Amino acid sequence: MVHPMLGDIITNVFAWLPMFSFVVVLAILYVAKHREPVPGGVPLGKTYACAQCGRRGNHEHMVPVTHEGAVVWYCSHCSH
């Protein structure tokens, strides 16, 4: 004769195991994805943000424009 408590334990395990496994797999994928290097690498040195689109770039890749006495920086895409 099977103890009634054993049936409840088996039912609970099979009810919660898929959800627990799914959460563990998501956590592993999240950690793996966030440890990947940034595509294109991180720019070295001082960077500037484009005044129009906000894209960041190195000093050499940005175009300075004087606007009302201040220098604003545009990326090569927005400067055209």
Image (cartoon, rainbow, N blue to C red):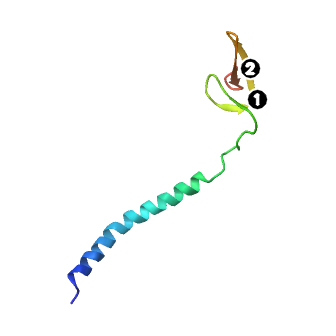
| In this rendering, position of residue 70 left or right of residue 9 | right
54, above or below 16, in the image: above
Q: How crowded is mark 2: few (under 14 residues within 10 Å), some or many (20 or more)?
A: some
Q: What residue type is labelled 2?
A: Pro
Q: Mark 1 points at which residue?
A: 59
Q: Where is residue 74 in the image (x, y as percent from the top left)?
A: 69, 23
17, above or below 61, in the image: below
User: Residue drawn 42% across and 65% down?
Assistant: 21
Q: Position of residue 63 (x, y in %)?
A: 74, 22
Residue lying farthest top? 68
**Which quadrant is home to the C terminus?**
top right
- Mark pair 2, 1: CA separation: 9 Å
Q: Name the residue under label 2.
A: 64
Q: In which quarter of the image is residue 16?
A: bottom left
User: Residue drawn 52% across and 60% down?
Assistant: 28
Which of the numbered marks, if any, corresponds to residue 51?
A: none
User: Residue drawn 23% across and 87% down?
Assistant: 2
